Image: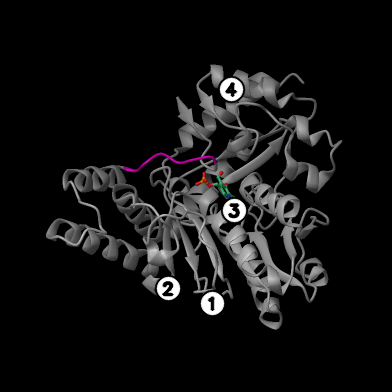
Amino acid sequence: MIYLDNAATTPLTDPVFKKMTEVMALQLANPSSIHAHGRLANQKLREYRQTIADLLNTSANHIIFTSGGTESNNTAIKGYALAHQDQGKHLITTAIEHHSVLHTVEYLEKQFGFEVTYIKPVNGVIRTADVVAALRPDTILVSMMYANNETGDLLPIAEVGKMLEQHPAAFHVDAVQVAGKIALEPEKLGIDFLSLSAHKFHGPKGVGVLYQNQQHFDPLLHGGEQENKHRASTENLIGIAGMVQALQDSCDKLSDNWAHVTSLANLFLKELSGLDYYLNSSEDALPHVLNIGFPNANNSVLLTQLDLQGYSVSTGSACTAGTVDPSHVLAAKYGQESHRLKESIRISFSELNTPEEVTGLAHLLQSLLGEN
Ligand code: PLP
């Protein structure tokens, strides 16, 4: 079976697997316990936190361990908005965010009377000028993804961070798709909250990070003083250890991995030559995500055909997978009625994929769609 759905999740690499089994064997105690076993666990936790902080070029007191991207996004948005609602109830986000952002701001709209401006792509891209134009005196938070999970499109995070220096609104960035692919330095980019998720960079599922720059915010989980009172619950030491190894390894190989997935994407498109297709990603996009459409294809049928031949790809967000829902991202870019919503699939590569795998997929697509 060939796995080409790495924007949905990535397999553990061997070093990550090894690290997690080693840490599991240590039978670490509860890091909050004051006895020697607890102190040892706490020492490990401190080391892990420091490594993540070093990788993000920040200090350890800015790092909160969470259960993943969804929790990090919920904590930043709900936690900040609810704690600062006396200063304003206007939020800005984009129409192409992951549902863990979109459904969270919708919840704030419905339950707490917040007003949300959704920035739409213009000619396929989210523009800084539109974000700036949407700012109001009562805007307290701007939440934008670093790169889109369905198309790989990169958003103008550095530019927006710069513009927000002139405005008191906090800046949350969902960096789930770029962590381990691009060097991340939230402090340099004017970011107040940054969400990461280990399983997108070959770490385990169910663990992530929220970088926060000490802004006051309400915790999502109550019932303990862990994570400097920002996130109750005993820390997932085995998962955190795996995540640390995975982020370290990915950051050590950023340019090699970028070159590898770029060459896989180029090879794949070369091997498709002769077949009619179009790309749904903008020019400025992550190279490992190819959102590609085939005129007159039916993407759910195509996915099933590929699956039967052992190739795992998707139509977009994993969180709506299982059902092939029309993509809200392609709808925002091309319109709800666009043929692209029914014809497009997402193929996403990782450092573990090989040229043979992508050539195999291209040839299979040629044989399935060639006579269209
Ligand atoms: N944000 C983005 C951009 C994602 O792609 C995902 C996962 O698909 C998430 C958030 C959610 O992360 P997690 O699966 O760790 O909750």
Q: Residue furthest left?
A: 36
Q: Earlier in the sequence, mark 3 or mark 4?
A: 3
Q: Label 1 belongs to which residue?
A: 188
Q: Amino acid at mark 1?
A: Lys
Q: Left or right? Give the position of 220 relative to 48.
A: right
Q: Earlier along the polypeptide chain: callout 1 or callout 2?
A: 2
Magenta residues?
A: 8-13
Nearest to viewer (mark 2 / mark 4):
2
Residue type highlighted by circle 3? Leu
Q: Distance of mark 3 from mark 4, alpha carbons?
A: 23 Å
Tag in front: 3 or 1: 1
- Residue appearing at x 82%, y 44% in the figure: 334
- x and y percent of residue 332 in the render? 79, 47
Q: Which amino acid is tagged 4?
A: Leu
Q: Which residue is mark 2?
A: 57
Whether 113 is drawn above or below 192: the answer is above
Which is more toward the observer, 317 or 66? Answer: 66
Q: Which residue is mark 3?
A: 286
Q: How many residues crowd around disc 2 within 10 Å: few (fewer than 14), some, or many (20 or more)?
A: some
* Count of marks placed on residues: 4
Residue drawn where x is 41% and y is 56% of the image: 232
Contact (CB < 8 A) between labels 1 and 2? yes
Is 11 within the magenta?
A: yes
Residue 191 at x, y = what percent? Answer: 57, 71
Q: Is residue 183 visible?
A: no
Percent x, y for residue 219? 50, 60
Cα separation, mark 1 vs mark 4, equals 43 Å
Chief SS of the magenta region: loop
For label 2, the SS is loop
Q: Which residue extends farthest front?
A: 223
